[in-house]
Image (cartoon, grey):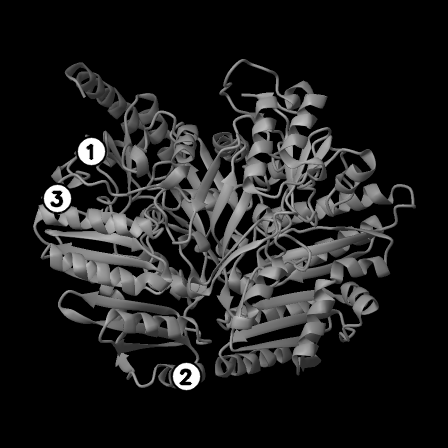
Amino acid sequence: MDAHILRELRAILGAHGLITSPEELRTYDSDALTTFRAMPRAVLLPSSTEEVQAIVRVCHREKIPFVARGSGTGLSGGALPVENGIVISLTRMNRILEVDLANAQVVVEPGVLNLDVTGRVEARGYFYAPDPSSQSVCSIGGNVAENSGGAHCLKYGFTTTHVLGLEVVLPDGSLVHLGGKTLDAPGYDLAGVFVGSEGTLGIATKIILRVVKRPECVQTLLAAFPSTNEAGAAVSGIIAAGMLPAAIEMMDNLAIQAAEAAVHANYPNCGGLLLVELDGPFAEVEALMSHVCEICRANGSGEIRLAQSEAERALVWKGRKSAFAAMGRISPNYIVQDGVIPRTALPQVLNEIEKLSKAAGLRVANVFHAGDGNLHPLVLYDKRIPGQEEAAEKLSNRILELCLAAGGSITGEHGVGEDKKKMMSKMFSEPDLDTMQRVRCAFDPLQLSNPTKVFPRPRLCGEKPGEYVPHPLETAGIADRF
Amino acid sequence: MNASEFTNTLAATAALEGSLRAIVGPQHLRSTVEADAVADVRPRIVVEPATEQELTAAVRLANDAGLSVIPRGGGTKLGWGNPPARADLILSTSRLNKVIEHPWADLTVSVEAGCTIEKLQATLAHHGQRLALDALWPARATIGGILSSNDSGSLRLRFGALRELIIGVTLALSDGTLASSGGKVVKNVAGYDLQKLATGALGTLGVIARAVFRVHPLPKTSKTFSISTQIFEESQRVLNAVQDSKLAHTALHVRAASDALPLVDVLFEGTEAGLAAQEAQLKKLLAPNALLDSPSTVWNARQHLWDNSDSAAIAKLSVLPCEIAQTLENIQRLGAQYRSHWQTIIEAFGIGWLRLEGSPENLRSELQELRAQLERESGSLIVLHRPPTLPPFDAWGNAGDALPLMRAVKHQLDPKNTLNPGRFVGGI
């Protein structure tokens, strides 16, 4: 990148809005998936939509690829920089612009933290429902990019359910509004396409969020089973009884041990632990919870505990939400996967995982959203032992293949990013992927916005506005033009 | 279309007929009759493919021949949108009507586009489940049509619109590409969400061949209450009080008309014990207003707007939830000004339906003024049904600054403008 471009960017943002020194850039060379690293040429810290537009216009003119970044907590390498490209960090755009509870809406900038949205509305009895485990540090912009879920999306839906509208800087620097404060605006549901597009269609600079009313009562139950098989059967029983709990989470023995070691959640030591949360009007929850207890007992649960206070409930969730980080207590390294299976395939897939784990000589801990079949198998390994990292990666990919064979998905909430783009061709056919890329061509004909993610091989769009200049990805041999 | 273009189209259609007949079989291709007209435009042939492959081949052949395609399910909402700029071929999904798979314990269902909502609901009910959507004309309306028109009713308050229920889609693009997105699991973020893009696209991007939905358990019991109100402000107060409470209502709307006082209806679903408690809470919350027990048929009010509607205009409104009373006052004022008879239902989440009857010129002015007012308040008005006498009137209104992007999406997926040309926003 020429010095004059950096000068131009500095003029837009001021000296404090531009990072170019190698030491400082290192902070941005990966997201929370640290196996992928790449050094950007510059990190830009805009404070306004206009600044984002000005930066993107320069990138567009100069055909410089850029990657938007929120808090960097993503687990799929979605915010991994393009080598020598630009990272646009949105952490300074962190204002809550509007709280409109009469219409149950909050308007935020992308750098606002997930939990801070709830923080602003909880005094009035509202909350922001998507609750990824990283919610105290992850940003709404990142949540929008990844269509983040969380434990409670079984009942409340994902980020996409809670985004009413977006202000977006398109990859040519122009500004558009997708969706809005009212529902069903005339035209295509481009907000629906943008959410979950992993930063490949542009940069959201304002987000209109829907907030929901806190239920009258929340009850959380822990049920201990001899193994995950019995716990899984209990989940089937709950679903068959026509209930839709706010959350159903499952942990196997290894995951329980790790959570215990890390946060002393006081979990029963058992083969399969189920956490069931019901919410709603008190009388309804009471009636349904007694039914859930019966189902758990009938499926062999030896110990059932209902959290007796908000503090107890919080502790139960703390153990679950810190399960990934807790792996550090029992293993030097781990890979977390995010596969999804039709829930009923659970026993079969878990047995297969166990077989693979034994064959590879690596331990696998299982933590999952059992209600919707979203597995988070944690493959434990020790990098210092030669060959273990490769073996762990192989095992982890085999697990995703199991999920696909069962009719599931390679990612339930972490996104495809850099990490799983090679798996995309195993889940989708070429025509499927081409069709998605045609949509991308409508948003980003020059393929500048997070260009190397999601798709196994980027396809450059046919149109060549202006004089033809080879795209950096073409020169590097990463992409073809079609 | 000039004379030579017309002759060319005629020749292209004749040549195409032979190829299409070979694909779908001679008994599944026929000339159109008067009843096949789409907003007074009569296409030439109707094709009824039986498989996704036949569907794809038919679309591709028409596209290659430069002929336009109107996808059709039950034909219940075929008049929605603007009249087609061209209409050569009707592609009927009537033979693609199977429920493909209902793995009930996974709470999902895969269904072909031509399956009616009634047939789907009957299948799901075998296992105590439903697609949580109260669509119009359930006996005839098909999954493809409901998705394309983004139809949803009162249950949307609790379960979301179709965009929240659809988890996978398979589309036949005009160039013959058969493409899927999403999948068969409820939680899935792999790839772009083309199922949301197809929902509400009025068949202009691809022909929906099949869809996968998440389903919900049927409620154990349900109960409907109505609250009679005197003025719109009072209706709004009732809506606000219920929405801002900790009640777990399933649906909530206000019904009003030029010749009746506004009524608020609220639906609860759940266990007997739960419902009794909610009824008591609702009573306390709304005192001194009385709660009237109402039959569940009040939730068909939206459907009844279409009864004997030949001379009526019917529009879909979208407003901010806290501006429902203001909207009702505007409707009432304009109704008085233009001497129209009106009936409306507005859901607590801000989507409403309005039926207007009056002189054609007045209806036009009234719709225009109301649309302008709603758009000023970041809302919208979409005309769904027009009386034949109504002067030309754009169905959609302002699509905002994303219109060029929408055109670009259309151009990428349907570059020859084969599918439903001219029917969508901004002439798409």
Screen quadrant of the C terminus of chain B: top left
Q: In terms of image quadrants, where is residue A472?
A: top right
**Going from the N terminus, do you reach mark 2 or mark 3 first?**
2
Residue B101 shows in the view: no
Q: List x then y, in percent, for residue B218.
A: 41, 69
User: In the drawing, does residue A136 fall left or right of residue A266?
Assistant: left
Between the C-alphas of marks 2 and 3, the distance is: 47 Å
Residue contact at pointers 1 and 3, CB within 8 angstroms: no
**Going from the N terminus, do you reach mark 1 or mark 3 first?**
1
Residue A3 shows in the view: yes
Residue contact at pointers 2 and 1, CB within 8 angstroms: no
Residue highlighted by disc 3: B390
Q: Residue at left 13%, top 40%?
A: B391
Residue sitting nearer the eye, A348 or B282: B282
Q: List x then y, in percent, for residue B256.
A: 21, 67
Q: Residue at left 44%, top 55%?
A: B165
Query: Amino acid under label 3?
Result: Leu
Q: Chain of mark 1?
A: B
Query: Amino acid under label 2?
Result: Gln
Q: Chain of mark 3?
A: B
Q: Residues within 10 Å of mark 3 (few under 14, many from 20)?
A: some
Q: List x then y, in percent, for residue B169.
A: 45, 44
Q: Nearer the viewer, mark 2 or mark 1?
A: 2
Residue highlighted by disc 1: B30
Residue sitting nearer the eye, A125 or A391: A125
Residue sitting nearer the eye, B46 or A186: A186
Q: In terms of image quadrants, where is residue A272?
A: bottom right
Q: Return the mark for residue B281.
A: 2
